[in-house]
Amino acid sequence: MLIATSCSELAQLESGRQQRIKERGRECMYNYKGELQGCNYMK
């Protein structure tokens, strides 16, 4: 699977902020290294 990332998303990752990605009814959070921190299922 190919994931397209915008410049603003890359800037957020580089600045060390957590990134939230919503996919298939869940919201996943990643740290600045891009490591998965956890996923929450959205109702």
Image (cartoon, helix red, strand yellow):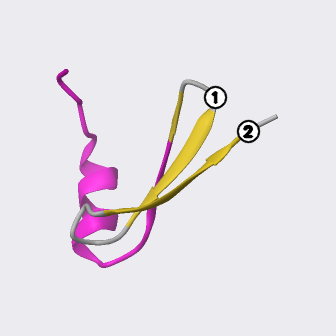
- Left/right of residue 26 with respect to residue 33 in the rendered view: right
Residue 2 belongs to the span the image colors magenta? yes
Residue 40 belongs to the span the image colors magenta? no
Compare marks 2 and 1 and give the one earlier in the sequence. Answer: 1
Q: Which mark is residue 34?
A: none
Q: Residue furthest bottom?
A: 16
Badges 2 and 1: C-beta atoms under 8 Å apart? Answer: yes
Q: Which residues are magenta?
A: 1-21
Q: Position of residue 16 (x, y in %)?
A: 31, 78
Residue in the picture at 27% in, 63% down: 35
SS at circle 1? loop
Residue in the picture at 21% in, 70% down: 33
Q: Nearest the camera: 3 or 42?
A: 42
**Quadrant in which residue 12 is drawn:** bottom left
Q: Residue furthest left?
A: 2
Crowding around mark 1 (Cα neighbors within 10 Å: few <14, some 14 to 19, many 20+) is: few
Residue in the picture at 43% in, 69% down: 18
Q: Which mark is residue 42?
A: 2
Q: How far apart are the two marked residues, 2 and 1, measured between alpha carbons? A: 5 Å
Quadrant assignment for the C terminus: top right
Q: Nearest the camera: 40 or 16?
A: 40
SS at circle 2? loop
Quadrant assignment for the N terminus: top left
Residue at which label 1 appears: 25
Q: Position of residue 23 (x, y in %)?
A: 51, 30
Q: How many marks?
A: 2
Q: Residue furthest right?
A: 43
Kind of residue indicated by mark 1: Gly
Crowding around mark 2 (Cα neighbors within 10 Å: few <14, some 14 to 19, many 20+) is: few
In the rendered image, the vertical position of residue 42 relative to residue 3, given as above or below: below
- Left/right of residue 41 with respect to residue 6 in the rendered view: right
**Quadrant in which residue 26 is drawn:** top right
